[in-house]
Image (tube, rainbow, N blue to C red):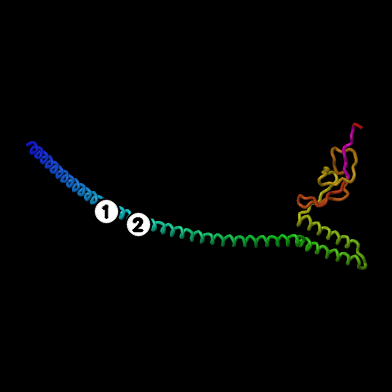
Amino acid sequence: MWLLSYAEQLYGNNSKDVNMSEEIDKDEEITEADDNAQTEECDTNNDEQECDEQCCNDNDTDTDDESEIIDDDDIQSELDQVKAELEKAKAEAAEYKDKWMRTYADMENLRKRTVIEKQDSLKYANFNIISDLLTILDNFQLAIEAGEKEPFDKDNYVNGIKMIENQFIDLLFKKYGVVKYGEQGEAFDPNIHQAMMMEEGDYEKDELAMVFRSGYKLHDRVVRPAQVKVGKPANKDK
């Protein structure tokens, strides 16, 4: 009897173990199915996400391409503007260079012409006065010829010489601005008088006691100083 009871108990336990094993297998199958479903869902989500990212990347690429196209147009426009400004600057530079070269040529010609005129002015500075002096020289030659003739007329000869002198004086004093100075009684000025002698006497100041040779000025410049004798006031303390 007890053997029968043990057998039943043992068989019953085995049946339970079989049932539990079947349940575990079913649970594992359900879990595996759930895992497969989740994996498929995740794959589907990943594919959709990758698709979205790819679409976004495509859109970004299109946007970048459009930006690059716009940037290229702006660069080309700026380049054309720079080229136009450069051409304008070149034209202005060429114009300024041409004007400068013309001005330089004019200044160089003026400089050369001025040098030539200055040289001619120095070379022919005495042209006019020589021309006038030649007329006086002719008159002197006529006077010499008149003095050599016989009979000799002294009065006419002297009058002829005086006429030549007056002609010469008019030429110097009236035409060329020469001034004669140096008269007895003038105040002594060492800047225009050359003192040849000095004497003390009844003089109120230093003055010309005697004139040996007259002085001459051309306008305000001394051509020849007057040679004089200077009279000085006497020292009454002596």
Estimate the spatial distance between the alpha carbons at disc 1 and disc 2, rounded to whole Å. 21 Å
- The residue furthest left is 1
Judge left or right: residue 45 versus residue 209.
Answer: left
Residue 79: quadrant of the picture: bottom left
Seen as rendered, the residue at the extreme top is: 237
In the image, residue 54 lies in the stretch drawn in magenta: no
Along the viewing direction, whichever of 26 and 126 lies nearer the viewer: 26
Q: Amino acid at mark 2?
A: Asp
Judging from the image, what secondary structure is the residue with disc 2 in?
helix
Amino acid at pointer 1:
Cys
Along the viewing direction, whichever of 182 and 189 lies nearer the viewer? 189
- Measured as percent of width and height from the top left, residue 114 is found at 68, 60
Tell whether label 2 touches label 1 (CB within 8 Å): no
In the drawing, what numbered circle is on residue 51? Answer: 1
Which residue in the protein does label 2 denote? 65
Q: In front: 210, or 61? A: 61
Q: Which mark is residue 198?
A: none
Residue 17 vertical position relative to residue 108 in the rendered view, above or below: above
Image x and y of residue 72, in percent: 39, 58
Per the rendered image, the range of residues in magenta is: 229-236
In which quadrant will I find the N terminus?
A: top left
Residue 31 in percent (x, y) is at: 19, 45
The answer to whether 77 is drawn above or below residue 41 in the figure is: below
Q: Secondary structure at mark 1?
A: helix
Q: Residues within 10 Å of mark 1 (few under 14, many from 20)?
A: few
Q: Quadrant where the C terminus lies?
A: top right
Q: Residue at x 84, y 58 (%)?
A: 165
